[in-house]
Amino acid sequence: MLKFIIIGLFEWLWCLSNLIVKPRRLSYQKGFDREVRTGRIDPALYESWKKKAFTLRSDYGYPISCEFIYKGKKKIAILCHGIGCAKYTSIKYAEMFLRLGFSVLIYDHRNHGNSGRAHTSMGYYERYDLKKLVDWCCQKFGPDCKIVTHGESMGAATVLMHLGIDRRVSCAIADCGYSDLKQLLRHLLKQFYHLPSFLIPVESLLTYLRAGFWYREVSPIKAVSGSDIPVLFIHGKRDNMVPASMSRQMYDSKRKNKAIFLVAGARHAESICKDRKKYEQVVKGFLEKCLVTPSP
């Protein structure tokens, strides 16, 4: 009997760990079609953009599926999608950045979309893939190009974690990002699964054995508090997946070069859909302030 209990407990913990390292994903085409149905993608507009698909090789050996949308050579926005999605969810933001005069680079995270299969790490390994894209931009357009990173949910955490290893970006925009993975998991276990938080250290050990990282190592707030690169935090006030308080915590932890925009009525990853005009206005003002060229 004890043997079956132990086996059952292990299988249950393995399934919980899978929520992190092997999240459920839509096929690329189904995800793209869903974005079209919900009005987040205008397929005619998307087809009209001058763009190029290409692949980069991750430092960990898998391919990173990328798409570059041309607007100019000196201002580039790199967009990072959330967990379980793919680069098609970045298209709604790409439209905004193109209007603001940026070329746009979108891509699939590891274990998502058309990129190679490797364990999802909630920003831990993903930040190094983002650095690889920054490398590509600097090599192609020169080290003086202005690079802005923008992320949604796990993409926001990736953008913020990246600040701790790479100073080449001009500024970053984090939309509905979490401040710390352990804090996020405590919230999710209580909110959606009604499970005790003492399981988190056990899950962290299991995840480390499977994927090579500890939950405590995924802490965007630590990267933010130690960086002087400007950050705009955006969060929906009705987000019950990642509480808006997490963006407030990160905003408070950052000493300078910061801004925050909280969107009334917006749930998780809904801010741009709730008030697109205001969203673009806030982003435009932030970018103009960050990218202004000092007078000689």
Image (cartoon, helix red, strand yellow):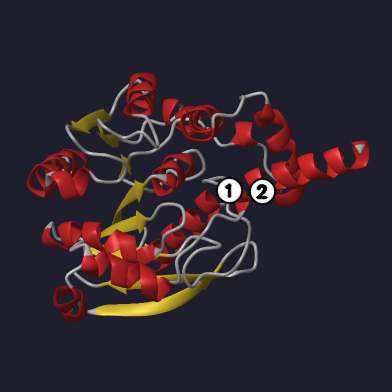
Marking on residue 143: none
Tell me if I can see residue 85 in this picture. yes
At 70% from the left and 50% from the top, the residue drawn is 211
Type of residue at label 1?
Leu
Q: x%, y% of residue 136?
A: 43, 66
Write down the residue under mark 1. 19
Q: In front: 146, or 224?
A: 224
Q: In front: 211, or 77?
A: 211
Q: In front: 148, or 14?
A: 14
Q: Is residue 268 above or below residue 49?
A: above
Dot 1 surroundings within 10 Å: few (below 14), some, or many (20 or more)?
A: few
Q: Quadrant of residue 9?
A: top right
Q: Give the structural element (helix, strand or loop) at label 2.
A: helix
Tell me if I can see residue 207 in this picture. no
- Report the number of discs: 2
Q: In which quarter of the image is residue 49?
A: bottom left
At 54% from the left and 61% from the top, the residue drawn is 110
Write down the residue under mark 2. 15
Q: In front: 199, or 269?
A: 199
Q: x%, y% of residue 24?
A: 52, 58
Q: x%, y% of residue 115?
A: 52, 69
Q: In this view, does 195 lie above or below 147?
A: above
Type of residue at label 2?
Cys
**Cβ–Cβ under 8 Å for marks 1 and 2:** yes
Q: x%, y% of residue 99?
A: 11, 60
At 67% from the left and 23% from the top, the residue drawn is 198
